[in-house]
Image: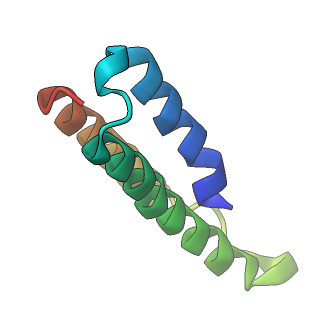
Amino acid sequence: MGFLFVAPVYAMFLISNRPAARRWSAWEVAVTILGPAVVGGLAGLRGWSLERYGERGPGTNWRFVAGMILLGGGLAVAMYLAWW
């Protein structure tokens, strides 16, 4: 599920920030699939682990939230520096 929610964001970023000739190169398509697979997979695993506890689930894990924001920001900066 995480992949399905994150993939359109990556695809729109690819379409809006690249000239038409570079949008569908092998590298661009591979990274557009790999990025959501990693980020969505991690978010999906986190969601699954929180659902295991049922009604008495733990509170918000703010370290995880901060880590995901830092990871997403780091990936965004790396993609910007790589002209992707």
Query: In the rendering, at what x and y percent does residue 53 appear?
Result: 75, 84
Query: In the rendering, at what x and y percent does residue 4 appear?
Result: 65, 53
The single residue placed furthest to the front in the displayed view is 21
Q: Is residue 26 left or right of residue 1?
A: left
Can you say which quadrant of the picture contains the N terminus?
A: bottom right
The single residue placed furthest to the left in the displayed view is 81
Can you say which quadrant of the picture contains the C terminus?
A: top left
Q: Tell me where residue 23 sits by quadrant.
A: top left
Query: In the rendering, at what x and y percent does residue 45 appear?
Result: 56, 74
**Residue shown at the point (38%, 58%) measured from the top left:** 34
Q: Nearer the viewer, residue 50 or 30?
A: 30
Q: Nearer the viewer, residue 82 or 27?
A: 27
Q: Is residue 32 above or below residue 84?
A: below
Query: In the rendering, at what x and y percent does residue 66 appear?
Result: 40, 49
Q: Nearer the viewer, residue 3 or 54?
A: 3
Residue 53 appears in the figure: yes
Q: Tell me where residue 75 sits by quadrant.
A: top left
